[in-house]
Image: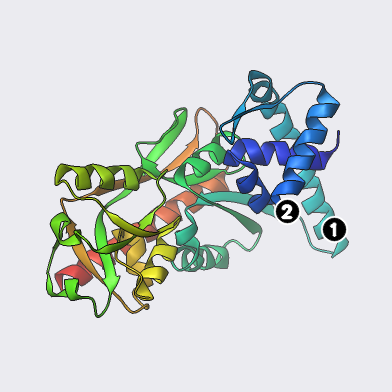
């Protein structure tokens, strides 16, 4: 076995699929599958069961994960140190942060840039994906902290609540629905929709809302981030229901937002591994992130009330 095979195994365990692992590692899906097969052959037992096209981790895989994670993280730290020594830089501390993909497009770059102005000895590595991917990343030490929706899908976290927001209806700026101050679910009957993928918690809640009024949603496009939803809406391909905070950072697009009823409420927090002492830099970044996110949320509320 080799480190690349172990990296592939860890990435599959973290993301839940060879597709997710391939994206994280910058490889093709077939290359990741090949690395997994080679590792299983070297070990002499299966790490995953294939059921209906999905990979299900075996008990042996769960047992190996902690050791493999420690080894892979250690090798990556050595590689990063070697890279910095080769180019003559001093060693910097690494801070690994898990966030939803849409936060990296508008919201997070400004927050990180401000933090790094006073912490030039830090390297920040961003891990992006769905909330369940972020939760797994925190648990397997791929991330030091993660921005997650509450309540979390998994347990064994220390959680610090951050903010609350509601779902909003996003539509093209010239859409007929803009004449309404509030979008009721009945307004979406026979309206083309751009919705977050079926495995997302919001989608489950939306489906319940649709069923309550006997409405069959006319889904035209499914996406996996708020940023993508807003971009497709801007092209006139439908309307969407998304997290109001993240939607507020895409208003440079030709879109309009309205409150959605019945209200879909969101609570978000920062997740940390349970019963572990946090390095000072992790606590410092968490405090900075919470403060800036709440300021951003207050700006959203102020603009609504203006």
Q: Nearer the viewer, residue 214 or 65?
A: 214
Look at the numbered disc 1 and give the secondary structure of its residue: helix
* Location of mark 1 (residue): 85
Q: 60 above or below 289?
A: above
Which label lies toward us, 2 or 1?
2
Left or right side of 22 for 198: left
Residue under the image location 32 percent in, 60 percent down: 245
Q: Nearer the viewer, residue 168 or 137?
A: 168
Look at the numbered disc 2 and give the secondary structure of its residue: loop
Residue under the image location 60 percent in, 39 percent down: 14
Left or right side of 59 for 303: left
Residue under the image location 73 percent in, 44 percent down: 32
What x and y, as percent, mark residue 221? 40, 60
Residue under the image location 41 percent in, 34 percent down: 153
What x and y, as percent, mark residue 43? 82, 24
* Location of mark 2 (residue): 27
Q: Nearer the viewer, residue 218 or 42?
A: 218
Numbered badge on residue 171: none
For disc 2, the neighbor class at 10 Å (few under 14, some 14 to 19, many from 20) is few
Left or right side of 113 for 107: left
Residue 219 appears in the picture as rendered: yes
Q: Evaluate if marks 2 and 1 touch, with contact meaning CB atoms under 8 Å apart.
A: no
What x and y, as percent, mark residue 149? 37, 44
Q: Nearer the viewer, residue 213 or 93?
A: 213
What x and y, as percent, mark residue 39? 80, 32
For disc 1, the neighbor class at 10 Å (few under 14, some 14 to 19, many from 20) is few
Q: 58 above or below 229?
A: above
Quadrant position of residue 280: top right
Residue 278 appears in the picture as rendered: no
Q: 253 above or below 67?
A: below
Q: Earlier in the sequence, mark 2 or mark 1?
A: 2
């Amino acid at each position: 076995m080799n480190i690349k095979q172990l990296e592939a195994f860890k990435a599959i365990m973290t993301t839940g699929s060879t597709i997710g692992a391939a994206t994280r590692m910058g490889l093709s899906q077939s290359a990741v599958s090949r690395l997994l097969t080679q590792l299983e052959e070297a070990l002499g037992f299966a790490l995953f069961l294939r059921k209906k096209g999905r990979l299900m981790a075996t008990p042996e895989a769960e047992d190996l994960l902690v050791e493999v994670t420690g080894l892979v993280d250690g090798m990556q730290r050595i590689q990063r140190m070697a890279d910095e020594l080769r180019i003559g830089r001093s060693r910097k501390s690494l801070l690994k942060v898990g966030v939803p993909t849409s936060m990296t497009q508008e919201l997070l770059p400004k927050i990180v840039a401000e933090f790094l102005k006073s912490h030039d000895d830090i390297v920040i590595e961003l891990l992006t994906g769905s909330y369940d991917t972020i939760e797994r990343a925190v648990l397997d030490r791929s991330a030091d902290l993660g921005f997650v929706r509450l309540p979390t899908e998994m347990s064994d976290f220390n959680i610090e609540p951050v903010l609350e927001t509601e779902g909003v209806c996003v539509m093209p700026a010239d859409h007929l629905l803009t004449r309404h101050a509030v979008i009721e679910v009945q307004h979406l009957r026979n309206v083309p929709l751009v919705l977050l993928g079926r495995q997302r918690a919001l989608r489950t809640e939306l489906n319940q809302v649709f069923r309550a009024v006997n409405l069959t949603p006319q889904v035209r496009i499914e996406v996996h981030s708020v940023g993508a939803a807003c971009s497709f809406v801007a092209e006139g391909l439908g309307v969407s229901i998304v997290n109001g905070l993240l939607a507020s950072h895409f208003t440079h697009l030709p879109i309009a937002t309205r409150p959605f009823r019945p209200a879909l409420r969101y609570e978000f927090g920062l997740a940390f591994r349970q019963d572990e002492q946090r390095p000072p830099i992790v606590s410092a970044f968490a405090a900075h992130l919470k403060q800036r996110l709440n300021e951003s949320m207050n700006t959203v509320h102020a603009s609504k009330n203006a």
